[in-house]
Image (tube, helix red, strand yellow):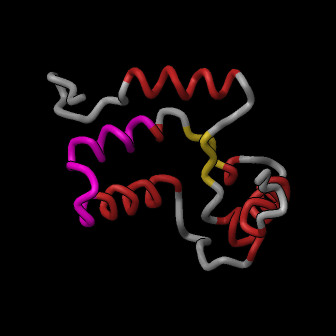
Amino acid sequence: MIDATSGAARPNYDTLQTLRLLRLHGFALTFYGGKALHAGAGAPTVDETWRSALERLAESITREGEVSEQHAHELIATIAANLFDLNAVEPASAGAAVAAAITSGAAKVC
């Protein structure tokens, strides 16, 4: 949806509700790039932020023609409204440990 006043994309209400229910059951969207991934797995992502990652995602999905620009902006707004950033975790080693586990697949269920 586009906000009529500001012209900015708004999160999709149905998706927000679904993500809220997922959080209530222990699931969450987590950004593990940037410093956390660099410290945990040595990936060259130290300067990446969740904002820059979302911008790259929007560019990628619109460039490949998978979704419209409006839908991409709604998706990005919805993700941003529900995102947890491991780079904000203290101590930083905790975020790095989770990023390493995700990257290596050590914590993968299936």
Q: What is the x, y in percent for residue 78?
A: 42, 35
Residue under the image location 63 percent in, 46 percent down: 30
Q: Nearer the viewer, residue 61 or 7?
A: 61
State the predominant SS element of the stretch in magenta. Answer: helix
2 sits to left or right of 78: left
Quick one: quadrant of the C terminus? bottom right
Residue 52 horizontal side relative to residue 100, left or right:
left
Q: Residue at x 65, y 57 (%)?
A: 32
Where residue 97 appears, as percent x and y from the top left, is: 83, 60
Q: How many marks?
A: 0
Residue 63 magenta: yes
Figure quadrant of residue 4? top left
| Towards the viewer: 89 or 21 | 21
Taking the magenta stretch, the answer to whether it contains residue 67 is yes
What x and y, as percent, mark residue 109?
79, 51
Vertical placement of 73 versus 1: above or below? below
- Left or right of residue 80: residue 1: left
- Magenta residues, as a range? 62-78
Quadrant where the N terminus is found in the figure: top left
The image quarter in which residue 76 lies: top left
Residue sitting nearer the eye, 101 or 9: 101
